[in-house]
Image (cartoon, rainbow, N blue to C red):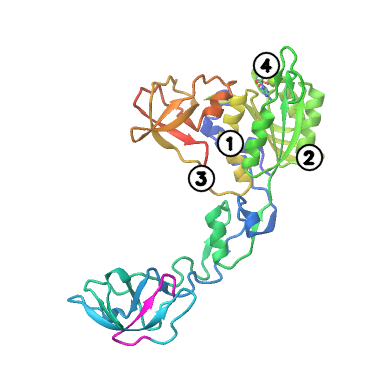
Amino acid sequence: MNSLQDAISCVSGYDPDALPVAKANEVIRGFIKPVPGVEKLPVRSALGRVLAKDIVSPIDVPSHDNSAMDGYAVRGADLSAEGPVTLTEVGAAFAGKEFTRAVGFGECVRIMTGAVMPRGTDTVVIQEIAKIDSKRVTLPAGQEAGQNRRLAGEDLAKGKPALRAGRLLRPADLGLVASLGIGEVSVRRKLKVAFFSTGDELVSVGKKLKAGEVYDSNRYTLWAMLTRLGCDVIDLGVVRDDPKKLEAAFRKAAAVADAVVTSGGVSVGEADFTKQMMAKLGEVAFWKIAMRPGRPMAFGRIRGRGKAAYLFGLPGNPVAVMVTFYHFVRGALLHMMGRGDTDLPLLRAKSQAAMRKKPGRTEYQRGILELRNGEWTVRLTGAQGSGILRSMSEANCFVVLGHEQGGVAAGDYVDVMLMDGLV
Ligand code: AMP
Ligand code: MG
């Protein structure tokens, strides 16, 4: 197994006290490995799972040349570029009901969309331009041989990979697999992710708040984000800021899960005792990331009861938890699941107002992307403090202000990342 130190030494200009987002992700990607484990599932149960093996097409789809339109199946050689031709209709072909006889010169067959092309024909002329006089069908000049015909195997060719390992199975993929007549697929097993909150001030929902206490909301946002990613989640509750209790919780989490996500306890005031404890559990780096919100974060691998798990120690502030989850943990967990495609696209939108920003850190402002006068524009959700969870709840996108970027003027274009993906 590689060490965290090896992964770190591969990254140029590594500075744990001012680590750019991209460099932190480089270390994470360099360290994390996909977890083994494959299971076979019926196609519908595989929705949202990661394909473990290429699916090779056992058949051609479509299995026969067939018509793309309602019209007349003809021999292309019968058509003329100079003028109309008149052919004799000798029968009809329907989807699921073939015209079995061969079609000769000067003949045509009435054909419906999806019907197998009758023997001898290679071209379909749409019905709207045909002139019919009993069984005599007159077709205009200018038709091309081979038009309006779907070729056998044009969707999926027999023996070729139809879907590649590592892809997330989306609705279209389920249909595609079914179109091959395949009923079961091999997918990666679900990741097991344990999570807990740390803090003496935290109270679980259902109890009364005393002075200075806050309800533990991070366990709800984390549960939701992990569930959406398709993980098996293990909620280990609230753990007090007590080294013994924390150590026991980390050991238990490492024993039962592939990855552990915690919130709180990594900020400057608390990091020292967390660091000492982590040194006993495995290899963990403590970072100050050049980002807002976010900043403190711990990452590494810990052990408990002979098992190991990757650790993501996120900051405690509710917005910082979500932002660091989306921009570090999400990609890492998808990589562990064997996903090939993990990058989210950035879109450009016009900013409705000026935004303040200092170069030298990445900012993830919470925005509302909306259509104004026919153009997609973005505005911020109001107060952007890292404790103001409402700014996440109201937002439909992140405004991503890059590491080098300075302030934004009203009307400038900015990068936005949608919070919801079409799946
Ligand atoms: P910490 O990173 O532990 O210093 O926490 C930073 C801030 O986030 C403090 O104001 C905490 O009260 C708050 N916080 C920490 N954990 C949670 C949680 N699970 N739910 C809500 N707020 C939290
Ligand atoms: Mg705390």
The residue labelled by disc 2 is 255
In front of the other: 229 or 34: 229
- Please provide the residue range marked out in magenta: 103-115
The residue labelled by disc 1 is 27
| Disc ID at residue 269 | 4
Is residue 348 something that shows in the picture? yes
In the rendering, at what x and y percent does residue 158 appear? 51, 71
**Secondary structure of the residue carrying numbered label 3:** loop
Q: Amino acid at mark 1?
A: Val
| Disc ID at residue 284 | none
Q: Amino acid at mark 3?
A: Leu
Cβ atoms at labels 2 and 4 below 8 Å apart: no
Separation of marks 4 and 3 at Cα, in angstroms: 41 Å
**Secondary structure of the residue carrying numbered label 1:** helix
Q: Residue at x 42, y 29 (%)?
A: 378
Cβ atoms at labels 1 and 4 below 8 Å apart: no
Label 3 CB-ligand 1 distance < 8 A? no
Separation of marks 2 and 4 at Cα, in angstroms: 28 Å
Crowd class of label 1 (few under 14; some 14 to 19; many from 20; radius 10 Å): many
Cβ atoms at labels 2 and 3 below 8 Å apart: no
Q: Amino acid at mark 4?
A: Gly
Q: Is residue 350 left or right of residue 273?
A: left
Label 1 CB-ligand 1 distance < 8 A? no
Q: Residue at x 65, y 39 (%)?
A: 226
| Disc ID at residue 422 | 3
Crowd class of label 2 (few under 14; some 14 to 19; many from 20; radius 10 Å): many
Q: Nearer the viewer, mark 1 or mark 4?
A: 4
